[in-house]
Amino acid sequence: MKTAHVWAVTAVVALALIGGAAVMKRKEAGNAPAFSPAEIQSPQPVAQAGAAPEEKPERKSPSSVRKTSGKMELAVPVLTEREKRLPLTYTCHKDNISPPLEWAGAPAGTKSFALMLVKDVEPPFTGWAIFNIPPDFTGLKENLPKRAELENGICHARSNHDASEYVGPCDPQGRFRYAFRLYALDVMLPLGVGAPVADLEAAMKGHVLDMAEAPFLHYLRF
């Protein structure tokens, strides 16, 4: 009898252990993650039926970025051929009048020109600037009037000399590099007469079709 009783108890305990193990497995299955660690770290997108592939937006370059063609030419007939030196007549040491200027090769689409006299220093010094020169002009005559507003809608900007008129080189000693710079623009600039040269430069940004330069030296030789 005792032996039968022991076997009965042993069977009950065994059944209990087997049932507990099954319950634990079901619990573990219920708490198991939906994705493996590898799938969590590198999830794969689920494609929907009939969905078009995602397109990346096209990168566009700024519309204001333009390159000059370098075909336009600017000439200052009074520059000496050998030295490219500006005669003192066109400096503040003598008559201080603007020199004659000629240009050619303006690109198609030119709506106006701007012209500057720039000294090669850091930062650059602009001693003369005019803008809204009509697009059919191919030059400027000598000795422009010393007033802010000229004929044909041409306007002087206020230069770094704080003057709205031509002011030629005035350096007393040494050799200095200057340049006349002509800009072909695709607009007439909406600036008032005597606008600061900094405003002129800002208004020109994104509108320069081409630029031509006529460099020269300035030094005293009486």
Image: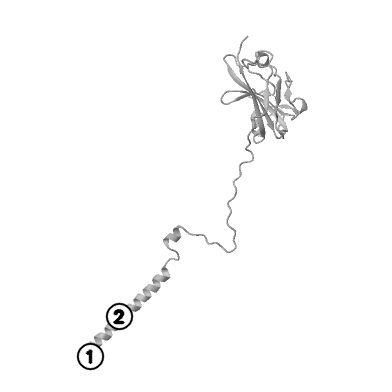
Percent of width and height locating residue 43: 48, 59
Relative to residue 34, is residue 81 depicted above or below? above
Check residue 1 in the rendering and tell me which mark sits there, or answer none: 1
Relative to residue 60, is residue 44 depicted above or below? below
Relative to residue 34, is residue 193 depicted above or below? above
Q: Is residue 139 left or right of residue 67?
A: right
Q: Which residue is found at the position 58% from the left and 16% from the top?
A: 175
Q: Which residue is found at the position 42% from the left and 69% from the top?
A: 31
Q: Residues within 10 Å of mark 2 (few under 14, many from 20)?
A: few
Amino acid, disc 1: Met
Q: Secondary structure at mark 1?
A: loop
Q: Is residue 158 visible?
A: no
Q: Quadrant of residue 174?
A: top right
What residue does disc 2 label?
14
In the current view of this chain or complex, which residue is farthest to the bottom? 1
Q: Quadrant of residue 121?
A: top right
Percent of width and height locating residue 190: 71, 34
Check residue 197 in the rendering and tell me which mark sits there, or answer none: none
Percent of width and height locating residue 128: 66, 23
Question: How has the structure been colored for display?
Answer: one colour
Q: Residues within 10 Å of mark 1 (few under 14, many from 20)?
A: few
Q: Earlier in the sequence, mark 2 or mark 1?
A: 1
Q: Secondary structure at mark 2?
A: helix
Question: Between residues 56 and 26, which one lies in front from this camera angle?
Answer: 56
Q: Which residue is found at the position 26% from the left and 85% from the top?
A: 7
Callout 2–callout 1 Cβ contact below 8 Å: no
The N terminus lies in quadrant: bottom left
In the current view of this chain or complex, which residue is farthest to the right? 152
Q: Quadrant of residue 143?
A: top right
Amino acid, disc 2: Ala
Q: CA distance from mark 2 to mark 1?
A: 20 Å
